[in-house]
Image (cartoon, helix red, strand yellow):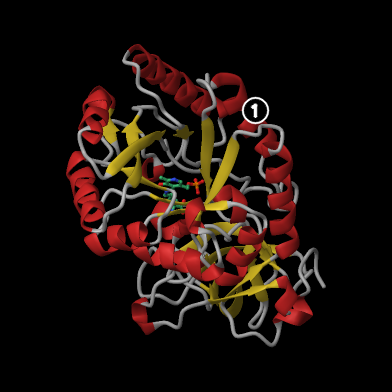
Amino acid sequence: MKGKFQVEKFKNIRTPFYYYDTNILRDTLKAIKSETDKHEHFMVHYAIKANANPKVLNIICQAGLGVDCVSGGEIERALEVGFPANKIVFAGVGKSDWEIELAINKDIFCFNVESIPELEVINQIAQEKGKIAHVAFRINPNVGAHTHANITTGLAENKFGIAMCDMLTVIEEAKNMKNVKFVGLHFHIGSQILDMGDFEALCNRINELQDTLERNNIKVEHINVGGGLGIDYEHPNLSPIPDFKSYFETYSKFLRLRNGQQVHFELGRAVVGQMGTLITKTLYVKQGSAKKFAIVDAGMTDLIRPALYQAYHKIENISSNAPTEAYDVVGPICESSDVFAKSIDLNKCQRGDLIAIRSAGAYGEIMASQYNCRKMPQGYITEEL
Ligand code: LLP
């Protein structure tokens, strides 16, 4: 056993694989519950896009969270695991007809609608089925977030949501349709946000929009503020649990609610990020002309975040206590971007050593691909080892 990993138990499992530490997951869920219990009108929908491994979902479902889906496949997965339909929200700029039908058939809680053409299709499908679909409008708040450009979503230039200036028009349109009911407003400014000031700015924007609605006598049952709370990629051991206290307090302090409104959150990364580790084996150590490479059996097909966003993940050699050396940690895929880290210090590596790529529970396994006809990585939870 080295550090927090029981390396012996990993030895019989085909690498690369994801290891999900369910103690961390349960502690994370407890922390969310203890903070949200302080605010009876707060409700968290887990953003299933972050990790849809059924074993992980089971634990999240048992903790009582709802679920935020962005495809028919995610809705099916959520229902299979046992999330009740009335705790499912369905977001996304491009919902297909079959996905809308599925959501209406199952009586999900609410659609987060991103355009008038989409609203018209939902209304029509609901009419065919003799049902009334609940809809919230995703408003693009034009609030920037201090995060990677590829994962900010709330700026005017992004494809997401309805412009603020069109908010009253779409609500009016919905009122004229017989088979949709307007129930809420939805926002999401981006992901991996650690500066609470960004969420405060969102609250201020929502307050302004709510003032406008109040002047127009429009009632809103719930405000969905999206997700986005970040995790500490640098220190997975020191900060395994994200700062939920500051996060929920920010909304409690700055969001001005009107009579009886609920606040919904769609957290993904913060729920599952720190419990996950990609375990990979060192295949070869190669001395290049300028640097030393640790060539591992995981690639960008197993964890694409470093290649796609230049994301940092802490990497450890969990098989060795030898003095450290500098390595580029690279995968086997035929792409120069198949690099997990450059010039990092690892305990001296040799063939067969297990390498842990940390904080990989969110947007890891779920974004894996079969490029190069690779086998998909499997995910294991603590109880299985
Ligand atoms: N709600 C909506 C509408 C979203 O688009 C997202 C994430 C979430 C909630 C959950 O956000 P979270 O709490 O996880 O930050 N693949 C990227 C992240 C993409 C996030 C997409 N939307 C990554 O690996 O960093």
Q: Which residue is mark 1?
A: 249
In which quadrant of the rendered view does residue 195 lie?
top right
Counting from the top left corner in percent of width and height, residue 123 is at 23, 47
Does residue 308 sit above or below 379 in this rendering?
Answer: above
As drawn, the residue found furthest toward the bottom would be: 12
Residue 257 or residue 27, whichever sits in front: 257
Question: From the viewer's perspective, is 291 left or right of 323?
Answer: left
Does residue 39 sit above or below 64 in this rendering?
Answer: above
Counting from the top left corner in percent of width and height, residue 51 is at 52, 62
- Residue drawn at x 60%, y 33% is 41
Counting from the top left corner in percent of width and height, residue 349 is at 66, 73
Question: From the viewer's perspective, is 344 left or right of 3?
Answer: left
- Residue drawn at x 34%, y 27% is 142
Residue at disc 1, CB closer than 8 Å to ligand 1: no
- Residue drawn at x 35%, y 63% is 72
Q: Is residue 338 visible?
A: no
Q: Amino acid at mark 1?
A: Glu
Q: Quadrant of the C terminus?
A: bottom right
Question: From the viewer's perspective, is 262 left or right of 174?
Answer: right
- Residue drawn at x 63%, y 82% is 351
Q: Secondary structure at mark 1?
A: helix
Q: Is residue 384 visible?
A: yes
Counting from the top left corner in percent of width and height, residue 19 is at 64, 70
Q: Quadrant of the N terminus?
A: bottom right
